[in-house]
Image: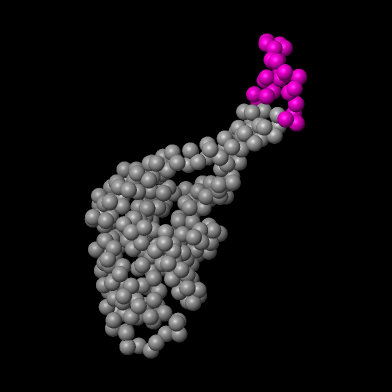
Amino acid sequence: MLAKSISVWWGIYLIIGCCIGFSIKTLNGLLFTLENMSQFRLSVFVPVVACGSLVLAVISYFISFAVNRLPMKKLRRQLDKIAAEKGISKEYTDLLALNCKGDMKNKVCIELAIAALLNGDAAKASEQLARIDIISASDVANSTGNYYIAAYYYAVTAVMHLAVKDSVKAASDYDNGRFYIDSMNNDPFIMAVKALCLMKKGERKEGFALVCEADNLRKRKLSKGRYNHLQGFILAAKANIFYDVERYEECFDLSADAMGIKISPEYEQHLISLGRAAKDNMNSNPSDFS
């Protein structure tokens, strides 16, 4: 993504540089006379334009990147503050809905879908995902190398179907978006979703190992007090997978840890039920997942 973005800027500055050089060469002697114009040589001009354009391209990319991120960073700070105080509340979703426009629309729709799932409303999550033009998002991903929207779309869609206990459709969502999901192997949320899908597909050891890796990455990447909705989801996913592999005592502890993150009453009730089920099974035979 970085290489493609800088290449676009580089191409723009190369064209401008070539146009300037051509104009100067053509107009010299016609409208004005430049001293030392006889020294104008392509062997000198081309490397200077190429190197100068590359430097300007790198500078322009980082400036545009910083400017484009400002609205989302401001929104993220506001969301994290609300989430820390009230969880994924109406105020949280109203603020997201207010900013669901322009370049941020797809990202906001994805966050609204995740918020709906954490509030136990799969139908609302489906409505938000339907607002995303996945064909356009896939085209953007393939042309720019930025797989965020496409990967999150398929991952959240899979979670939505898992929430309504439709493992077949969840597996289909994972398979359809596997290229994008696998490309985001450093994103703890995507990794946690992939782990859940692998568990449902019968690849239990792979799913177990991946969700542990996702949680370790969560601890390193997501600072305390930020991205509460993602942090809560990853912990809940890990607790569920530990229950599935019969690591009941650790599942109980993970459920308690996950409840320390304020999300929603539905999220809390799920963890309470999971913790109780784990406690009831603590005397079961030890698992081979050690």
- Judge whether residue 122 can be spotted in this image: no
Residue at horizontal 36 percent and vertical 72 percent from the top = 239
Percent of width and height locating residue 21: 68, 24
Residue 9, relative to residue 182: is it above or below?
above
Magenta stretch in the rendered image: 19-44
Residue at horizontal 54 percent and vertical 58 percent from the top = 183
Residue at horizontal 67 percent and vertical 32 percent from the top = 48
Is 129 in front, or is 268? 268
Percent of width and height locating residue 188: 44, 62
Residue 63, relative to residue 117: is it above or below?
above
Rendering quarter of residue 257: bottom left
> Is residue 75 rendered to the left or right of residue 133?
left
Residue at horizontal 27 percent and vertical 74 percent from the top = 273
Q: How is the image coloured?
A: one colour
Percent of width and height locating residue 231: 36, 61
Residue 215, relative to residue 202: is it above or below?
above
Specify whether residue 30 is painted magenta. yes
Location of the C terminus by quadrant is bottom left
